[in-house]
Image: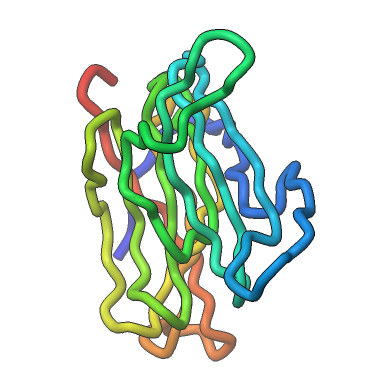
Amino acid sequence: MALSGPSKPVRFIAAFNGYDGARHLEAKAPDYIHYEVLHPSPDGKYVAQVTVADAEITTITIYRKKAGRQLFVKREAVSPAIEGVSGAIWVPRHPHTLAYATGSVYSWGSLGLWDGGKKVRILRRGKGPEEGFSLRGASADGRTLVYENYGPGTIDPHYKRKGRLYWTLAGS
């Protein structure tokens, strides 16, 4: 099935993963966080805290950013903890919208979107527990995500299939 797309070349911005800009934290017990990095939203109102913990599980939680020296308060999360994240990006031209991809041996894979509420919206879900997604980036206009999906249900013998998902956000 052919995908329709823009007629002129589109510039893409790379997604971030759990290790981009991460600082190593000394593990004090098996369930402690090993890496942590903060990614502020383009409008400066939110911060995505990316943590990589035991078994290399990456989790993103979004917090409202605070004024002053303190970046955020942990008890004021504005999103659920999103586990098994393989890539995320603050969507260009949508100042507080975060797109993400999940996929791990512990959860079903999905492409999702957080756009300022307490919940996330699933754009695409894996067909089984072993199918996952990896987000590569978004177009500069904020209308297109570039991802790969992998798992036994994909057609590539190396379990990877590249694809593009087009969607329009309100106000685009």
Residue 18 picture location, percent across and down: 63, 54
| Residue at the image position 44 percent from the left and 70 percent from the top | 103
Q: Which residue ends up furthest to the front in the rendered image?
A: 28
Q: Where is residue 77, by image quadrant?
A: top left
Q: Quadrant of residue 21?
A: top right
Q: Residue at (39%, 55%) from the top-left corner? A: 82
As drawn, 93 above or below 33: above
Query: Number of numbered discs present?
Result: 0
Q: Residue at x 42, y 32 (%)?
A: 63
Q: Quadrant of the C terminus?
A: top left
Most foreground residue, 77 or 5: 77
| Residue 67 falls left or right of residue 168 | right
Residue 28 x %, y %: 72, 66
Identify the image's colour scheme: rainbow, by chain, secondary structure or one colour: rainbow
Q: Position of residue 44 (x, y in %)?
A: 51, 15
Left or right for 165, reference 8: left
Residue 143 appears in the figure: no
Q: Is residue 99 visible to the viewer in this orientation of the structure?
A: yes
| Residue sitting at x 38%, y 52% | 81
Residues 93 and 33: in front is 33
Q: On the rendered image, what quadrant is the N terminus found in? A: bottom left
Q: Is residue 90 above or below residue 162?
A: above
In front here: 153 or 104? Answer: 104
- Report x, y in % for residue 129: 33, 83
Farthest residue to the top: give it. Answer: 68
